[in-house]
Image (tube, rainbow, N blue to C red):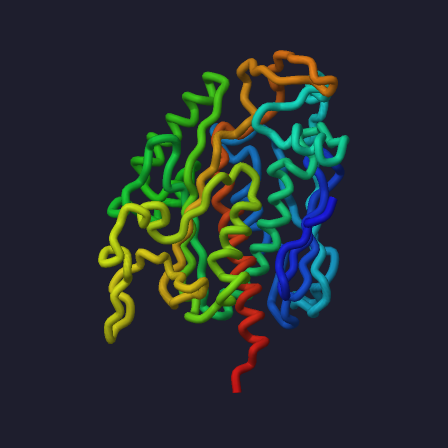
C-alpha cells in the first residue's frame, strides 16, 4: 500500500493499523532547534482520544505518545522524528462475525477490488485510528507555525440540520463542550441530537470549520500546487470527508461578481468571501475552510450487503463506534491544515528572495 506520506519539504508518514500493536508517524523536515516535548503532542492527541464522552466511541485508549527519535535535550535535531502510540484496548472479536461481508459505507468493497485482500479488524489502515498519526504530526507543525505567529482553530459548525450561524460563533465555547461546537446552547442541542441517533442505532453527519490566522500573503504555488488545492487534498484525505469549501464556498455559485469580490482599501481587504485565498495563494486574511463529514458508516441497524462470494446477505455490525465523527475530527482537520501551511512556509523560505 503506497501513498502513506504527505508533504513536500515537511513530510509526515503515518503507519500502523487500528487493531495492530501500535500506530504512529515519522516526520521529516522539521527544522533543528525547535523546542518539543511529549506534552506538546499529547495535548492534541487528548483532544482526538476515543472515549472522551457519551457521544464518542466506547473504545478506551490512553493514547500516550512516545518520542523515539529526532529530539535531544528537549529540542529537535533536524533528524526524522518518530512518534508511537500503543493500541491498548483492541477488541477484534466483534468483527469475526462479519469478516466475510463487505460493510456498506466502508472501504471494504474498494479494498477488495484493488488488493483482493483486506484487514477486516476494524478497517485496518482505513480506520479513523490512522488519523492519530496526522494529529501528532500536526502538533509539531503547529509548533513551527507558532514561531511565525500563525494559529489554527477548529470547531463543529453543524450537526445534521442544526447549524451555528455566523453571528452566533463563539470560539471560546469550543473546548467547553463535548461536541466542540462554537456555541454553548447549540452544543447542548447538538449533543441531544447525537445521543438520540445513537440510541436508535444510527449515526449523523456534520460540518467542521477551521480558521487559520496570521498566515502571510503569498503562500502557495500559482498553478498545480495552489495552497487552496493542497488544502482541499489534505482535508479530503481524511476518512468520512465528502466535501470541502473555502470562504463562502458553494454560496458563491449563486452570487454576482459585485457581491463576491472582496474590495481592497488602504487598510486592506474589506470582506473575506474568498476565505483568505486568491489565485491559489494566501492573501494575508484569515483562511476559512469547512469540511463536510458523512454519517459514520458503522451503525447498529441491519443492512443489506454481499459476502466475499457475491451472495446477498444481511448484516448487523457489532463494535464501538462514534455516532458523529465531528467532535473528534476537529483536531484532525486542524492538523491537516497545519501540515499544508508549514510545508508551504518552508517552500516559500526556499525561494530566498534577493
Q: Is residue 76 above or below residue 67?
A: below
- In the depicted view, which residue is nearer to us: 22 or 303? 303
* Lateral position of residue 78 relative to residue 47, left or right: right
* Lateral position of residue 112 relative to residue 290, left or right: right
Q: Residue at x 71, y 30 (%)?
A: 112
* Lateral position of residue 87 relative to residue 233, left or right: right
Seen as rendered, the residue at the extreme bottom is 354
Q: Position of residue 275 (x, y in %)?
A: 36, 57
Q: Is residue 283 above or below residue 334?
A: below
- In the depicted view, which residue is nearer to us: 341 or 251? 251
Q: Position of residue 209 (x, y in %)?
A: 41, 47
Say which quarter of the image contains residue 27: bottom right
Q: Is residue 321 above or below residue 153?
A: above
Q: Position of residue 313 (x, y in %)?
A: 64, 12
Q: Residue at x 50, y 41 (%)?
A: 329
Say which quarter of the image contains residue 39: bottom right
Q: Residue at x 33, y 30 (%)?
A: 189
Is there any visible trace of residue 260 in the rendered image?
A: yes
Instruction: Give the mark count.
Output: 0
Q: Position of residue 147 (x, y in %)?
A: 51, 69
Q: Residue at x 53, y 16 (%)?
A: 301
* Lateral position of residue 125 relative to residue 285, left or right: right
Is there any visible trace of residue 88 in the rendered image?
A: no
Q: Quadrant of the N terminus?
A: top right
- In the depicted view, which residue is nearer to us: 326 or 222? 222
Amino acid at each position: 500500500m503506497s501513498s502513506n506520506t504527505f508533504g513536500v519539504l515537511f513530510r509526515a508518514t503515518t503507519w500502523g493499523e487500528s487493531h495492530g500493536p501500535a500506530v504512529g508517524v515519522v516526520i521529516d523536515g522539521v527544522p533543528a532547534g525547535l523546542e518539543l516535548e511529549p506534552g506538546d503532542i499529547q495535548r492534541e492527541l487528548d483532544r482526538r482520544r476515543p472515549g472522551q464522552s457519551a457521544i464518542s466511541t466506547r473504545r478506551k485508549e490512553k493514547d500516550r505518545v512516545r518520542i523515539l527519535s529526532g529530539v535531544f535535550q528537549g529540542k529537535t535535531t533536524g533528524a526524522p522524528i518518530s512518534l508511537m502510540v500503543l493500541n491498548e484496548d483492541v477488541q477484534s472479536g466483534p468483527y469475526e462475525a462479519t469478516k466475510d461481508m463487505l460493510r456498506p459505507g466502508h472501504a471494504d468493497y474498494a479494498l477488495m477490488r484493488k488488493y483482493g485482500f483486506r484487514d477486516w479488524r476494524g478497517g485496518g489502515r482505513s480506520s479513523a485510528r490512522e488519523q492519530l498519526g496526522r494529529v501528532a504530526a500536526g502538533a509539531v507543525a503547529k509548533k513551527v507555525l507558532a514561531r511565525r505567529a500563525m494559529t489554527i482553530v477548529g470547531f463543529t459548525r453543524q450537526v445534521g440540520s442544526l447549524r451555528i450561524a455566523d453571528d452566533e460563533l463563539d470560539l471560546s465555547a469550543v473546548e467547553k463542550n463535548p461536541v466542540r461546537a462554537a456555541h454553548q446552547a447549540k452544543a447542548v442541542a447538538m449533543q441531544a441530537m447525537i445521543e438520540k441517533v445513537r440510541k436508535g442505532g444510527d449515526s449523523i453527519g456534520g460540518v467542521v470549520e477551521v480558521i487559520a490566522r496570521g498566515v502571510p500573503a503569498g503562500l502557495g504555488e500559482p498553478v498545480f500546487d495552489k495552497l487552496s488545492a493542497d488544502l482541499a487534498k489534505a482535508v479530503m484525505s481524511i476518512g468520512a470527508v465528502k466535501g470541502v469549501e473555502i470562504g463562502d464556498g458553494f454560496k458563491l455559485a449563486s452570487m454576482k461578481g459585485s457581491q463576491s469580490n472582496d474590495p481592497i482599501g488602504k487598510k486592506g481587504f474589506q470582506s473575506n468571501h474568498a476565505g483568505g485565498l486568491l489565485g491559489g495563494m494566501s492573501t494575508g486574511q484569515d483562511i476559512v475552510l469547512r469540511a463536510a463529514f458523512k454519517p459514520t458508516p458503522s451503525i447498529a441497524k441491519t443492512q443489506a450487503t454481499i459476502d466475499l462470494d457475491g451472495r446477498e446477505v444481511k448484516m448487523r455490525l457489532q463494535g464501538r463506534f462514534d455516532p458523529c465523527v465531528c467532535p473528534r475530527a476537529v483536531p484532525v482537520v486542524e492538523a491537516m491544515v497545519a501540515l499544508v501551511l508549514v510545508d508551504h512556509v518552508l517552500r516559500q523560505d526556499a525561494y530566498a528572495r534577493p
